Amino acid sequence: MKDFVKKIEDLSSLGEDKRAEKVLRKLLAKHPTDIYCLSQLAGTLLYQEKFDEALCAIQEAEAVQPTFPLVQYYKGKILLCNHKAQESIKSWDFLLHTPLENFVDKEYGINKKRIKSLKNDALLYKSMCHYCLGHVKEAKEYGEGMRWTKKLLADARELRADCIKHRDGLKL
């Protein structure tokens, strides 16, 4: 695993998104096409609610390696946060329908356990996308197929409230 991966993961898990962004930007100055750094930068920008910057960062990452799992994960989240639920579904479908072994990347700490977690999250977010689009039946179907954790349940409630709040303004 690359040395900086653990540092970024630690900062992210502590909610130190501004510090993580600073570290990632320094790394990207040296390694401008590092797919892990590009996708993580998009994620840290998203968590700081810098949605336009996050969208630009994930588009840059996607141009480098569109099949990297974190690219699709953050792309799906960014699109959903930008009220583009229909487009977001494509990222979740990619994560759900691509075989696990295609995603493993030890260099970046992406193992089968992490991929299973991403796939579980993909079920949640695909469910939320359908809910935002008013597809209640599909939302329930995808929601039933996932393993719920306390964190995911809290995320789902927050996202659902946001979907209800913005449903009329969605760009479908």
Image: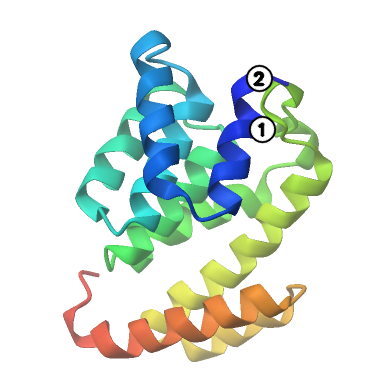
- Residue 109 spot, x, y in % from top left: 72, 32
Q: Quadrant of residue 148?
A: bottom right
Specify the amino acid type for callout 2: Asp
Say whether residue 142 is visible.
no
Count residues near mark 2 (Cα–Cα under 10 Å), then give few for <14, some for 14-19, many for 20+: few
The percent coordinates of residue 161 (x first, y second) are 39, 88
Q: Identity of the amino acid at label 1? A: Lys
Secondary structure beneath label 2: helix
Which residue bears the numbered disc 2? Answer: 3
Reply above or below: 69 against 77. Answer: above
Q: Is residue 128 above or below residue 126?
A: below
The circle drawn on residue 31 is none
Q: Quadrant of the N terminus?
A: top right
Residues under numbered marks 1 and 2 in contact, where contact means CB atoms less than 8 Å apart? yes
Q: Nearer the viewer, residue 106 or 99?
A: 106
Q: Secondary structure at mark 1?
A: helix
Give the x, y percent position of residue 160. Answer: 44, 85
- Distance from disc 1 to disc 2, alpha carbons, whole Å, reads 6 Å
Would residue 58 be found to the left or right of residue 139 on screen?
left
- Residue 55 percent coordinates (x, y): 28, 45
In this orientation, does residue 96 appear? yes
The disc label shown at residue 6, or none: 1
Category of crowding for the residue at label 1, using alpha-carbon neighbours closer than 10 angstroms: few (below 14), some (14–19), many (at least 20): few
Q: Residue at x 56, y 55 (%)?
A: 93
Residue, x 66% and y 53% (percent of image)? Answer: 118
